[in-house]
Image (cartoon, helix red, strand yellow):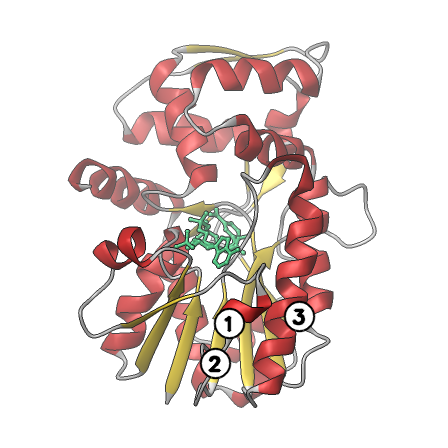
Protein backbone atom coordinates (compact mmCIF):
# COMPACT_ATOMS: atom_id res chain seq x y z
CA UNK A 1 0.00 0.00 0.00
CA UNK A 2 1.35 3.43 -0.95
CA UNK A 3 1.03 5.96 1.84
CA UNK A 4 1.66 9.71 1.71
CA UNK A 5 2.60 11.49 4.93
CA UNK A 6 2.21 15.25 4.95
CA UNK A 7 3.91 16.87 7.95
CA UNK A 8 6.43 13.99 7.82
CA UNK A 9 9.26 16.16 9.12
CA UNK A 10 7.27 17.39 12.14
CA UNK A 11 7.11 16.03 15.68
CA UNK A 12 4.34 13.48 14.98
CA UNK A 13 5.44 12.70 11.41
CA UNK A 14 8.99 11.84 12.50
CA UNK A 15 7.61 9.03 14.69
CA UNK A 16 4.87 7.96 12.29
CA UNK A 17 7.14 7.39 9.28
CA UNK A 18 9.39 4.73 10.90
CA UNK A 19 6.32 2.95 12.32
CA UNK A 20 4.75 2.77 8.84
CA UNK A 21 8.01 1.46 7.34
CA UNK A 22 8.22 -1.11 10.13
CA UNK A 23 4.67 -2.25 9.31
CA UNK A 24 5.71 -2.80 5.68
CA UNK A 25 4.05 0.14 3.91
CA UNK A 26 5.60 2.19 1.12
CA UNK A 27 6.01 5.72 2.40
CA UNK A 28 6.18 8.99 0.49
CA UNK A 29 6.87 12.10 2.58
CA UNK A 30 5.93 15.65 1.73
CA UNK A 31 8.07 18.57 2.83
CA UNK A 32 8.29 22.17 1.69
CA UNK A 33 12.06 22.00 1.65
CA UNK A 34 13.85 18.76 0.87
CA UNK A 35 17.23 20.10 2.01
CA UNK A 36 16.06 20.49 5.62
CA UNK A 37 13.41 17.76 5.71
CA UNK A 38 15.42 15.00 4.03
CA UNK A 39 18.09 14.92 6.70
CA UNK A 40 15.55 13.66 9.24
CA UNK A 41 14.00 10.90 7.11
CA UNK A 42 14.91 7.26 6.51
CA UNK A 43 16.54 6.35 3.17
CA UNK A 44 13.60 4.06 2.34
CA UNK A 45 11.26 7.06 2.23
CA UNK A 46 10.47 8.72 -1.08
CA UNK A 47 10.72 12.43 -0.34
CA UNK A 48 8.69 14.88 -2.45
CA UNK A 49 8.64 18.65 -2.26
CA UNK A 50 5.38 20.54 -2.12
CA UNK A 51 3.46 23.18 -0.21
CA UNK A 52 -0.22 22.63 0.59
CA UNK A 53 -0.69 26.41 0.36
CA UNK A 54 0.44 26.29 -3.28
CA UNK A 55 -1.85 23.86 -5.12
CA UNK A 56 0.30 23.78 -8.28
CA UNK A 57 3.21 22.41 -6.21
CA UNK A 58 1.10 19.32 -5.39
CA UNK A 59 1.07 18.00 -8.99
CA UNK A 60 2.14 14.34 -8.90
CA UNK A 61 2.46 14.26 -5.10
CA UNK A 62 -0.63 12.03 -4.74
CA UNK A 63 0.12 9.73 -7.72
CA UNK A 64 -0.77 6.10 -6.84
CA UNK A 65 -1.38 7.03 -3.19
CA UNK A 66 -3.96 4.80 -1.42
CA UNK A 67 -3.96 6.54 1.94
CA UNK A 68 -2.66 9.94 3.07
CA UNK A 69 -1.99 11.36 6.53
CA UNK A 70 -2.67 15.03 7.17
CA UNK A 71 -0.32 16.36 9.88
CA UNK A 72 0.04 19.95 8.73
CA UNK A 73 -0.68 23.10 10.72
CA UNK A 74 0.23 26.74 10.26
CA UNK A 75 0.85 27.72 13.89
CA UNK A 76 3.86 29.95 13.66
CA UNK A 77 2.40 31.78 10.67
CA UNK A 78 1.13 34.54 12.99
CA UNK A 79 -2.34 36.08 13.08
CA UNK A 80 -3.24 34.49 9.74
CA UNK A 81 -2.94 30.91 10.91
CA UNK A 82 -6.66 30.03 10.79
CA UNK A 83 -7.08 31.29 7.20
CA UNK A 84 -3.92 29.48 6.12
CA UNK A 85 -5.10 26.24 7.73
CA UNK A 86 -8.47 26.47 5.94
CA UNK A 87 -6.76 27.05 2.61
CA UNK A 88 -4.21 24.27 3.20
CA UNK A 89 -6.89 21.72 4.08
CA UNK A 90 -9.03 22.68 1.07
CA UNK A 91 -6.06 22.40 -1.31
CA UNK A 92 -5.11 19.03 0.16
CA UNK A 93 -8.72 17.76 -0.12
CA UNK A 94 -8.95 18.83 -3.79
CA UNK A 95 -5.60 17.32 -4.80
CA UNK A 96 -6.21 14.04 -2.92
CA UNK A 97 -9.72 13.70 -4.39
CA UNK A 98 -8.55 14.38 -7.92
CA UNK A 99 -5.84 11.71 -7.59
CA UNK A 100 -8.34 9.10 -6.31
CA UNK A 101 -6.91 8.70 -2.79
CA UNK A 102 -9.21 6.30 -0.89
CA UNK A 103 -8.53 7.22 2.72
CA UNK A 104 -7.20 10.17 4.70
CA UNK A 105 -6.18 10.15 8.37
CA UNK A 106 -5.96 13.50 10.15
CA UNK A 107 -4.68 14.24 13.65
CA UNK A 108 -6.41 17.26 15.17
CA UNK A 109 -7.18 18.56 18.64
CA UNK A 110 -9.57 17.53 21.42
CA UNK A 111 -12.06 19.99 22.89
CA UNK A 112 -15.84 19.99 23.00
CA UNK A 113 -17.43 21.39 19.85
CA UNK A 114 -19.65 24.42 20.42
CA UNK A 115 -17.99 25.54 23.63
CA UNK A 116 -15.87 28.65 23.96
CA UNK A 117 -12.95 27.03 22.20
CA UNK A 118 -9.67 28.89 21.75
CA UNK A 119 -8.91 30.01 18.15
CA UNK A 120 -6.28 27.27 17.82
CA UNK A 121 -8.58 24.43 18.91
CA UNK A 122 -11.43 25.87 16.83
CA UNK A 123 -9.15 25.98 13.82
CA UNK A 124 -8.08 22.34 14.29
CA UNK A 125 -11.77 21.35 14.19
CA UNK A 126 -12.45 23.61 11.22
CA UNK A 127 -9.71 21.77 9.31
CA UNK A 128 -11.67 18.59 9.95
CA UNK A 129 -14.72 19.98 8.13
CA UNK A 130 -12.60 21.17 5.19
CA UNK A 131 -10.92 17.77 4.89
CA UNK A 132 -14.32 16.06 5.08
CA UNK A 133 -15.27 17.77 1.79
CA UNK A 134 -12.89 15.44 -0.07
CA UNK A 135 -13.87 12.43 -2.13
CA UNK A 136 -12.33 9.85 0.21
CA UNK A 137 -13.07 8.37 3.61
CA UNK A 138 -11.74 10.55 6.41
CA UNK A 139 -10.66 9.35 9.84
CA UNK A 140 -9.98 12.13 12.33
CA UNK A 141 -8.13 11.49 15.55
CA UNK A 142 -8.45 14.19 18.20
CA UNK A 143 -5.80 14.40 20.90
CA UNK A 144 -4.86 16.75 23.75
CA UNK A 145 -1.23 17.44 24.60
CA UNK A 146 1.08 14.77 23.14
CA UNK A 147 3.95 13.81 25.41
CA UNK A 148 7.20 13.30 23.51
CA UNK A 149 10.55 14.91 22.76
CA UNK A 150 10.04 17.76 20.30
CA UNK A 151 6.31 18.32 20.97
CA UNK A 152 5.88 22.11 21.16
CA UNK A 153 3.12 21.84 23.76
CA UNK A 154 4.98 19.38 25.98
CA UNK A 155 8.21 21.39 25.59
CA UNK A 156 6.42 24.37 27.15
CA UNK A 157 5.51 22.30 30.21
CA UNK A 158 9.02 20.86 30.46
CA UNK A 159 10.74 24.22 30.12
CA UNK A 160 8.43 25.87 32.66
CA UNK A 161 9.14 23.32 35.35
CA UNK A 162 12.85 23.15 34.53
CA UNK A 163 13.36 26.88 34.73
CA UNK A 164 11.00 27.94 37.53
CA UNK A 165 11.03 26.29 40.97
CA UNK A 166 8.09 28.45 42.15
CA UNK A 167 5.15 29.38 39.96
CA UNK A 168 2.40 31.91 40.39
CA UNK A 169 -0.22 30.61 38.04
CA UNK A 170 -3.71 31.57 36.86
CA UNK A 171 -6.86 29.52 37.15
CA UNK A 172 -6.13 27.45 34.05
CA UNK A 173 -3.77 25.23 36.06
CA UNK A 174 -6.95 23.46 37.19
CA UNK A 175 -8.28 22.72 33.69
CA UNK A 176 -8.55 18.98 33.08
CA UNK A 177 -6.59 17.49 30.20
CA UNK A 178 -5.82 13.98 29.01
CA UNK A 179 -2.21 13.89 27.80
CA UNK A 180 -1.20 10.96 25.61
CA UNK A 181 2.21 9.44 24.85
CA UNK A 182 3.49 9.90 21.30
CA UNK A 183 3.95 6.14 20.88
CA UNK A 184 0.25 5.56 21.71
CA UNK A 185 -0.83 8.19 19.16
CA UNK A 186 1.31 6.47 16.52
CA UNK A 187 -0.08 3.06 17.45
CA UNK A 188 -3.66 4.35 17.01
CA UNK A 189 -2.88 5.99 13.69
CA UNK A 190 -1.11 2.93 12.24
CA UNK A 191 -3.69 0.37 13.45
CA UNK A 192 -6.48 2.45 11.88
CA UNK A 193 -5.19 1.58 8.39
CA UNK A 194 -6.28 -2.05 8.77
CA UNK A 195 -9.53 -1.41 10.67
CA UNK A 196 -12.16 -0.37 8.10
CA UNK A 197 -14.64 0.64 10.85
CA UNK A 198 -12.43 3.63 11.62
CA UNK A 199 -13.08 5.10 8.16
CA UNK A 200 -15.55 7.99 8.17
CA UNK A 201 -15.24 8.55 11.92
CA UNK A 202 -13.91 11.10 14.39
CA UNK A 203 -12.07 9.27 17.15
CA UNK A 204 -11.05 10.87 20.43
CA UNK A 205 -7.84 9.56 21.94
CA UNK A 206 -6.23 10.20 25.31
CA UNK A 207 -3.85 8.66 27.81
CA UNK A 208 -4.92 6.54 30.81
CA UNK A 209 -5.17 9.53 33.21
CA UNK A 210 -7.07 12.82 33.31
CA UNK A 211 -4.78 15.43 34.86
CA UNK A 212 -4.94 19.14 35.59
CA UNK A 213 -2.06 21.19 34.18
CA UNK A 214 -0.93 21.67 37.77
CA UNK A 215 -0.66 17.90 38.27
CA UNK A 216 1.03 17.54 34.88
CA UNK A 217 3.64 20.14 35.85
CA UNK A 218 4.23 18.59 39.27
CA UNK A 219 4.73 15.11 37.81
CA UNK A 220 6.96 16.40 35.02
CA UNK A 221 9.06 18.17 37.65
CA UNK A 222 9.28 14.94 39.64
CA UNK A 223 10.45 13.03 36.54
CA UNK A 224 13.16 15.66 36.16
CA UNK A 225 14.14 15.26 39.81
CA UNK A 226 12.80 18.69 40.81
CA UNK A 227 10.37 20.02 43.38
CA UNK A 228 7.82 22.51 42.20
CA UNK A 229 5.83 25.03 44.24
CA UNK A 230 2.66 26.24 42.59
CA UNK A 231 0.69 29.19 43.93
CA UNK A 232 -2.56 29.59 41.99
CA UNK A 233 -3.63 33.25 41.83
CA UNK A 234 -7.13 33.86 40.40
CA UNK A 235 -6.33 37.51 39.57
CA UNK A 236 -3.58 36.58 37.11
CA UNK A 237 -5.36 37.04 33.78
CA UNK A 238 -4.75 34.69 30.85
CA UNK A 239 -3.14 37.62 28.96
CA UNK A 240 -0.64 38.23 31.72
CA UNK A 241 0.20 34.55 31.96
CA UNK A 242 0.93 34.55 28.23
CA UNK A 243 3.67 37.17 28.74
CA UNK A 244 4.97 35.36 31.77
CA UNK A 245 5.23 32.01 29.92
CA UNK A 246 6.95 33.79 27.00
CA UNK A 247 9.66 34.98 29.33
CA UNK A 248 10.46 31.46 30.44
CA UNK A 249 9.95 29.17 27.42
CA UNK A 250 11.50 28.96 23.94
CA UNK A 251 8.61 28.48 21.45
CA UNK A 252 8.03 31.74 19.53
CA UNK A 253 4.92 33.75 20.54
CA UNK A 254 3.21 32.83 17.24
CA UNK A 255 3.19 29.22 18.47
CA UNK A 256 3.02 29.65 22.25
CA UNK A 257 0.16 32.21 22.38
CA UNK A 258 -2.45 30.10 20.55
CA UNK A 259 -1.43 27.07 22.63
CA UNK A 260 -1.65 29.00 25.92
CA UNK A 261 -5.07 30.39 25.00
CA UNK A 262 -6.24 26.76 24.63
CA UNK A 263 -5.30 25.95 28.24
CA UNK A 264 -8.67 27.27 29.41
CA UNK A 265 -10.54 24.56 27.47
CA UNK A 266 -11.01 21.11 29.04
CA UNK A 267 -9.55 18.55 26.63
CA UNK A 268 -10.80 15.16 27.74
CA UNK A 269 -12.07 12.11 25.85
CA UNK A 270 -15.88 11.94 25.99
CA UNK A 271 -16.42 9.36 23.22
CA UNK A 272 -14.64 6.04 23.74
CA UNK A 273 -15.10 4.54 20.26
CA UNK A 274 -11.34 4.58 19.55
CA UNK A 275 -10.70 2.29 22.52
CA UNK A 276 -13.45 -0.06 21.30
CA UNK A 277 -12.23 -0.28 17.70
CA UNK A 278 -8.48 -0.25 18.28
CA UNK A 279 -6.27 -2.11 20.69
CA UNK A 280 -3.67 0.22 22.19
CA UNK A 281 -2.07 -0.38 25.55
CA UNK A 282 -1.91 3.12 26.96
CA UNK A 283 1.32 4.41 28.47
CA UNK A 284 1.09 5.90 31.99
CA UNK A 285 1.84 9.65 32.05
CA UNK A 286 4.97 9.32 34.21
CA UNK A 287 6.47 6.74 31.86
CA UNK A 288 5.64 8.91 28.82
CA UNK A 289 7.43 11.86 30.46
CA UNK A 290 10.47 9.77 31.33
CA UNK A 291 10.75 8.62 27.72
CA UNK A 292 10.31 12.16 26.43
CA UNK A 293 12.98 13.51 28.75
CA UNK A 294 15.41 10.69 27.85
CA UNK A 295 14.80 11.17 24.10
CA UNK A 296 15.23 14.93 24.39
CA UNK A 297 18.66 14.31 25.95
CA UNK A 298 19.60 12.05 23.00
CA UNK A 299 18.57 14.58 20.33
N1 LIG B 1 2.19 18.26 19.30
C1 LIG B 1 1.06 18.06 20.00
O1 LIG B 1 1.07 18.05 21.26
C2 LIG B 1 -0.24 17.82 19.28
C3 LIG B 1 -1.38 17.58 20.06
C4 LIG B 1 -2.61 17.32 19.43
C5 LIG B 1 -2.68 17.33 18.04
N2 LIG B 1 -1.56 17.59 17.29
C6 LIG B 1 -1.71 17.63 15.83
O2 LIG B 1 -0.77 16.81 15.19
C7 LIG B 1 -0.48 17.34 13.89
C8 LIG B 1 1.02 17.43 13.70
O3 LIG B 1 1.55 18.29 14.70
P1 LIG B 1 3.12 18.36 15.05
O4 LIG B 1 3.22 18.68 16.50
O5 LIG B 1 3.82 17.16 14.50
O6 LIG B 1 3.55 19.67 14.20
P2 LIG B 1 5.00 20.21 13.81
O7 LIG B 1 6.08 19.47 14.52
O8 LIG B 1 4.96 21.69 13.96
O9 LIG B 1 5.11 19.85 12.25
C9 LIG B 1 4.34 20.52 11.31
C10 LIG B 1 4.55 19.87 9.95
O10 LIG B 1 3.72 20.55 9.00
C11 LIG B 1 4.43 20.69 7.80
N3 LIG B 1 3.89 21.87 7.11
C12 LIG B 1 3.59 23.08 7.67
N4 LIG B 1 3.09 23.91 6.73
C13 LIG B 1 3.10 23.21 5.56
C14 LIG B 1 2.71 23.52 4.25
N5 LIG B 1 2.23 24.74 3.93
N6 LIG B 1 2.84 22.57 3.28
C15 LIG B 1 3.34 21.34 3.58
N7 LIG B 1 3.72 20.98 4.83
C16 LIG B 1 3.61 21.90 5.80
C17 LIG B 1 5.90 20.84 8.19
O11 LIG B 1 6.70 20.31 7.14
P3 LIG B 1 7.97 21.07 6.44
O12 LIG B 1 8.41 22.18 7.37
O13 LIG B 1 8.99 19.99 6.25
O14 LIG B 1 7.43 21.58 5.16
C18 LIG B 1 5.99 19.95 9.43
O15 LIG B 1 6.38 18.64 9.06
C19 LIG B 1 -1.19 18.71 13.82
O16 LIG B 1 -2.39 18.56 13.09
C20 LIG B 1 -1.48 19.03 15.28
O17 LIG B 1 -2.63 19.84 15.44
C21 LIG B 1 -0.34 17.83 17.88
Whether residue 78 is situated above or below residue 204 in the rendered picture: above
Q: Secondary structure at mark 3?
A: helix
Judge by depth and name the residue closer to the eye, 69 or 244: 69
Is 13 on the left-hand or right-hand side of 172? Answer: left
Query: Residue drawn 37% across and 31% down?
Result: 220
| Number of callouts | 3
Q: Residue furthest front?
A: 56
Q: Please give left or right for residue 12 compared with residue 22 in the image.
A: right
Between residue 112 and residue 108, name the one nearer to us.
Answer: 108
**Residue identified by numbered label 1:** 58
Relative horizontal placement of residue 254, taking residue 1 as reference (left or right):
right
> Where is the N terminus found, in terms of image quarters?
bottom left
What is the x, y in percent for residue 209? 49, 48
On-image quarter of the C terminus: top left
Instruction: Name the residue tied to disc 2.
Output: 62
Crowdedness of circle 1 by 10 Å Cα count: few (<14), some, many (20+)?
many
Question: In front: mark 3 or mark 1?
Answer: 1
Is 30 situated above or below 167?
below
Q: Which residue is mark 3?
A: 131
The residue at 36%/55% (across/down) is: 33
Query: Residue, x 26% and y 68% (percent of image)?
Result: 18
Q: CA distance from mark 3 to mark 2?
A: 15 Å
Amino acid sequence: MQILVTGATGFVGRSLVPALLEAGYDVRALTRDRSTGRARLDDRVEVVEGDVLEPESLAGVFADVDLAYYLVHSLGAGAEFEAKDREAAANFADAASEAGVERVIYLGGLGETGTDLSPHLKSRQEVETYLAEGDYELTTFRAAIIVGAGSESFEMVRQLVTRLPVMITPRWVRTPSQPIAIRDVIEYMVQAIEVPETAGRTLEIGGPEILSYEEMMRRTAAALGRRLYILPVPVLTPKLSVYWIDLVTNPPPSISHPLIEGLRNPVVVTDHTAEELLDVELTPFDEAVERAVANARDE
